[in-house]
Image (cartoon, rainbow, N blue to C red):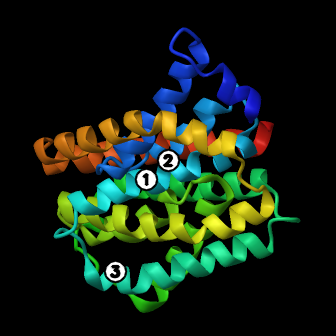
Amino acid sequence: MTAIAQSLSVDNPLFWLFCLAALFVGLSKGGLPGFGMLSVPILSLAISPVVAAVLLLPIFILSDIAGVWLYRREYSAANLRLLIPAGILGVVIGWATASFISEQMVSFLIGVLGISFCLNIWLRPGVNSTPRVASLGKGWFWGTMAGFTSFVSHAGSPPYQVYVLPQKLSKNVFAGTTTILFAVVNLAKVIPYANLQPYSGAAIKVSLLLLPAALVGTFLGKYFTQRVPDRWFFMAVQVALFLISIKLVLNGVFT
């Protein structure tokens, strides 16, 4: 990590790769879900995925602060009452099983789930025409899955979206609920991550260097969320979910 911190300067291509990953984190916190899941794969082009996940957590948390402020009045309280405790439970399960649960297996299963969900929406549109309501059982199940997969690889969006998209929330309420939920989940990951791989001064330095890019992404995400029509916003969310799910399946098969 010290070597990474020392190598990050504007004349080093690695610096811009890190900035791109931080920008994507910010875009996801600004209301464009799916972009944040691309951050770990981007950094994995240059460093270990485990190191990338640990390194990005402070950036996620700092971006969460801006995202929660932007969406402080736009969220689904009924969903958050279920999803927040469930998400924390998922983090605890991920921590407890970190030594013997394969990240590749989790990636494959979540990817298959996301692909199946998107295909069901696209091929059977009439089945999902009636908005669903927040459900205790489904909320706890999918919230726990979201917390667990977020702990494993910052990939909590697919389970969360499988649960929330059928409710047909407005785009701002959907984005706000997403941002607030994962802000809490990310905070819950701090102690487990520090236990598994303690943070160093170099890691914090890297995170602070990347914070401006993450904050720019957060406000850009909010800007685009407000201006994209609902229909195209949710289609973009579904396409992003589908493509990311394919990537997760490939990671599970070939990694």
Q: Which mark is residue 79?
A: 3
From the viewer's perspective, is the residue at label 3 or at label 2 nearer?
Answer: 2
* Mark 2, secondary structure of its residue: helix
Assess whether mark 2 and mark 3 are in contact (beta carbons under 8 angstroms): no
Residue at x 58% of width, y 54% of height: 154
Quarter of the rendering containing residue 129: bottom left
Amino acid type, label 2: Ile
Q: Does residue 197 appear to the left or right of 23 in the view shown?
A: right
Quarter holding the N terminus is top right
> N-terminal of the two: label 3 or label 1?
1
Amino acid type, label 1: Leu
Q: Which mark is residue 62?
A: 1
Q: Which mark is residue 85?
A: none
Q: Is residue 78 above or below residue 238?
A: below
Q: Residues within 10 Å of mark 3 (few under 14, many from 20)?
A: many
Q: Is residue 90 visible?
A: yes
* Mark 3, secondary structure of its residue: helix
Q: Which mark is residue 59?
A: 2
Q: Does residue 97 appear to the left or right of 20 in the view shown?
A: right
Residue at x 42% of width, y 58% of height: 120
Assess whether mark 2 and mark 1 are in contact (beta carbons under 8 angstroms): yes
- Estimate the x, y position of residue 146 in percent, counting from the top left: 54, 67
